[in-house]
Amino acid sequence: RRAAAVAAVGRGLRGPLGMTGRRWRSGAGSPERAAPERAPRIYTRTGDSGFSSTFTGERRPKGDRIFEALGATDELSSAIGLAGEFSSEKGHTFVDQLHKVQCMLQDVGSNLATPLSSAREAHRKRTSFSEKPVLELEQWIDNYSEQLPPLRAFILPSGGRSSAALHFSRAVCRRAERCVVPLVQAGEADPNVAKYLNRLSDYLFVLARYAAMKEGKEEKIYIKPEP
């Protein structure tokens, strides 16, 4: 079901799970006289047999590495959403950037749900992923890095709720990258997707440090435990 939702984004659709439709049937002429359309069901039962569909219509087992990568990317967006809520409560100005990242992750998912081995040219054009978002992340990283104190020790996830949530998002991002790299190496996904996730984890790390600094929170560092 999730793959279908991501695929819908690739088609440019909007609404719950990518489904759209007119609110009123057109035959009656006016909303007052028209009957409301039946709301679409969230469940489809098409995945009950353990298979799901890619954007190209191909049916694959849910344990396929494409769906592993899609799931990890979905988890990453959820983690960033949580970090964004904590950061918003503290008035951080980078919240809009996090929202943009979540939107970009939808495009990442669309690309992953379109395996290049079975995609037609029209599919590839709809779900292509350029290098431009990668370069934008690098600009953000450089901007925040210039404002941070030098890194002289190994930092543990800490520094307040915003910072800790961003560190958690970074760790989830690393896992998503590990899921995506084999797809890129197999020629199933665009290399720019893996590049984006790689830079995104760096961005989240720098942003976690920046959030702690702006909130005046202490970053805990690694201290070798006594034997």
Image: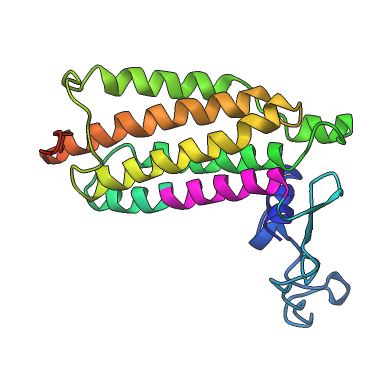
Q: Toward which corner of the image does residue 176 lie, by quadrant?
A: top right
Q: Position of residue 184 (x, y in %)?
A: 68, 27
Rendered residue at 56%/40% (across/down): 105
Q: Is residue 30 left or right of residue 74?
A: right
Camera-side residue: 204 or 21?
Answer: 204
Q: Position of residue 83 (x, y in %)?
A: 35, 49
Quadrant location of the C terminus?
Answer: top left
On screen, 174 above or below 51? Answer: above
Rendered residue at 30%/28% (across/down): 206
Rendered residue at 49%/27% (across/down): 198
Magenta part of the chain:
64-79
On screen, 41 above or below 3? Answer: below
On screen, 194 above or below 103? Answer: above
In magenta stretch: residue 132:
no
Q: Is residue 100 visible?
A: no
Q: Toward which corner of the image does residue 138 lie, by quadrant?
A: top left
Camera-side residue: 110 or 115?
Answer: 115
